[in-house]
Image: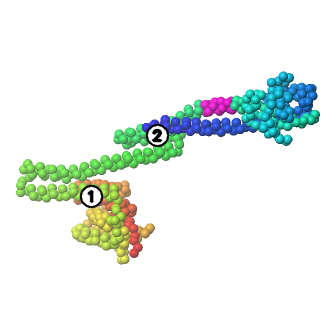
Amino acid sequence: MKRSFGGQMTLTVCLILLTLTILSTITQLMYRHLTVDLLADDVTASASAAADMTELLGTDAVRGRQQLCIQLNYTARATGNDTVVCDESGTVISCSCGLQSCEHLGYQFDHALLDGASADRPGFRSNLEIGCYGEERMAAVSFAQPKTGGLRYVVSSRSAKTVTQRLGEAFRANLLAVALVLLLAIPMVWIIVQRQMRPIRQMTAAARRMAHGQMDVRVDADDTDTAELNELALAFNNMAQALAKSELKRQEFVANVSHELKTPITTISGYMDGMLDGTIPVEQQPRYMEIISGEVKRLSRLVRSMLEISCIQDQGIPAERKRTFDLCQTVGEVLLSFERKINDKSLEVEVDLPDQGARTLADPDAITQVVYNLIDNAVKFCPERGTLGLRVSQAKGGKYLVSVRNTGPTIPSDELPLVFDRFHKTDKSRSADRDGWGLGLYIVKTIILSHEEDIYVTSRDGVTEFSFTLPKVTV
């Protein structure tokens, strides 16, 4: 697997090289086109000028022919274009070489080339094989009509190698430019990629440390980094913080479970050892066996509650378990099941339920457990001759609000956010409570959140109230 740094460097350099190649190719093509156009204009201009001189000086008299050769030679040295004058049959009668015995004299041009010129515009060919020069040339043909009469053809040409030479020079210049750009770009890209990889390497190192149990590790965000990298660092730190909290909760959970299990296990173990070694008389063993049975049942309830919570958290409340039912009827039935405990503490009960009922869509068994746990909690903490309140009312957003309140000790404000946590008990004196595990309110919260509803608690002036919402179903 390739490293991120090497892969990014290779990709960036390849992109730069591809871009430079495309730009160089386009530049070469444009330069070639421009060079051909300029040379064509130059050769064409030379042909037109030579034609004008031919008409002015003539080619019939020896003196005129000598003057024309001198002028053509001068023009050839100035422009670099070779020029010949042909008679009507296409035979060369004058040349820009300036030599009286020029090898080009007497060469017969093909009429296909000569006929390419018109009376008002010279004919141009970019690649033409001219035998008297022995190479391909760029040539332009123009008409000339000397004063002495007759028709003359003027052919100005230049070697086609000129284009190749200029393109070669341009290619070498482009190649040098590409090399210079790469020499400058590669170190800059290396520095930029290194800076981009630095926070990623830090996160990798931090992740390895977290894998070894160091949950306090964090990644520093640098102002010189990009906004995306800073956001990634912030997300990583938030994740690390969440994992640290989760690990702390896990440790607290294990500690709480160990603490809660220690007492019944110690009790069971002590009584069993006492019966086995004879410390507990035989006639008293049935009573201690009942105690052991109660402790085992309590352990069973704890395990069952934890499995139930785990199942709800993993799977939620299946849609097939939800159905429409009367919330008031459910609340009333649960309240009746606490009649004995309410009478034992002489509690005053205040019930406020809608006369027309309250139809809702939920898991009736789960909601029954929620109401049962809340009322059980309220009765447990309500003092003798206290007040127990139960109300179902309409709330905003098409919801029902179910409230269970009781008089009694006010829960401190710093304890309110913790009352729904696992194994949390607001009354520290009840740490040895034989009937409670600190899971009741946690189960309540888990069930309500699984229904995608809200639950909250308030406690002030000696009144504690738990409230949760459920959807309203219109009949």
In percent of width and height, residue 453 lies at 39, 63
Residue at image coords 21%, 57%: 300
Residue at image coords 43%, 69%: 398
Whole-number angstrom distance, CA of label 1 to CA of label 2: 43 Å
Q: Find residue 343 and report its image quarter.
A: bottom left
**How many marks on residues?**
2
Q: Which residues are magenta?
A: 167-181
Residue that mark 1 sits on = 305
User: Does the rendering let one see residue 459?
Assistant: no
In percent of width and height, residue 434 lies at 22, 57
Which one is in front, 205 or 115?
115
| Mark in front: 1 vs 2 | 2
- Label 2 element class: helix
Q: Find residue 462 and report its image quarter.
A: bottom left
User: Does the rendering let one see residue 474?
Assistant: yes
The mark that comes first in sequence, 1 or 2, is: 2
Residue that mark 2 sits on = 200
Which one is in front, 76 or 193?
76
Q: Quadrant of the C terminus?
A: bottom left
Please say whether residue 124 is one of the residues in the magenta stretch.
Answer: no
> Mark 2 packing: few (<14 Cα in 10 Å), some, or many (20+)?
some
Vertical side of 340 occupied by 290: above or below:
above
